[in-house]
Image: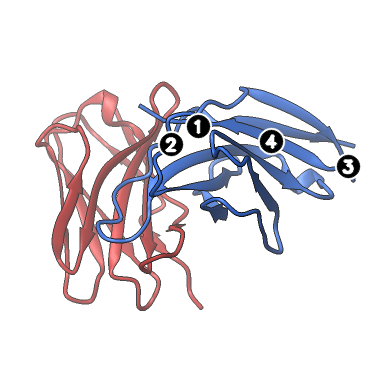
Chain colours: A blue, B red
Amino acid sequence: DAKTTQPPSMDCAEGRAANLPCNHSTISGNEYVYWYRQIHSQGPQYIIHGLKNNETNEMASLIITEDRKSSTLILPHATLRDTAVYYCIVRSYGGSQGNLIFGKGTKLSVKP
Amino acid sequence: KAGVTQTPRYLIKTRGQQVTLSCSPISGHRSVSWYQQTPGQGLQFLFEYFSETQRNKGNFPGRFSGRQFSNSRSEMNVSTLELGDSALYLCASSFPGEGYTFGSGTRLTVV
């Protein structure tokens, strides 16, 4: 079973920031938080990952709470092309890479 | 650089037949994983290969098998196809410490 809980759906206005929450209250000390998204009928796309510090890349920012029990993915200026299902996943890093356990994700709809 | 390439993109098979799907990872990636995606079950892990060895396996029947070649290319095989095997089959490759890069998938329809 997935170790994360996400809202099933969210709406966001085009040009505004999209903040997608994720709860992972049972996360272990050696587990990272990964975010992927899947646009309809395509393979999932890696967005960002982090351990305990906030992370930012060209696609998004990841904010992880101090107790690491939850995180938020931020798309700073959402566009229509960001409409997708967003998956939050926790997994160990390194060694046997292991598998990604996908939950149901959050369906983000960006509206004009 | 070229992404993960899966062939074929679409496939229609009859119940009882077998099928082989192919995946070419990103150059330099030695880890290849396979996933099945269905509307009912979502994305489920099938197996992972690293340097020609199966490293992890999901909870699927023995009809599902795979292998990896010395050039890191991978194939998965499903024997005695059932209607419930209709799905999008996704392959992903990665370099240690990086996120997985997925291919566009092979959509298998069993009739």
Residues marked 1 and 2 touching at CB (< 8 Å): yes
Q: Nearer the viewer, residue B17 or B59?
A: B59
Q: Secondary structure at mark 3?
A: loop
Query: From what the image shows, is residue A92 above or below residue A7?
Result: below
- Tell which tag, 1 or 3, sits nearer the viewer: 1
Residue annotated with mark 4: A20
Residues marked 1 and 3 touching at CB (< 8 Å): no
Q: Give me the C-alpha separation between circle 1 and circle 3.
A: 26 Å
> At label 3, which amino acid type do we have?
Arg
Q: Name the quadrant containing residue A67.
A: top right
Q: Residue at x 33, y 61 (%)?
A: A94
Tell me, yes or no, whether dots 1 and 2 are on the same chain: yes
Q: Chain ID for label 3?
A: A
Query: From what the image shows, is residue B13 above or below residue A52?
Result: above
Residue annotated with mark 3: A16
Tell me, yes or no, whether dots 2 and 4 are on the same chain: yes
Q: Residue at x 47, y 40 (%)?
A: A89
Residue annotated with mark 1: A24
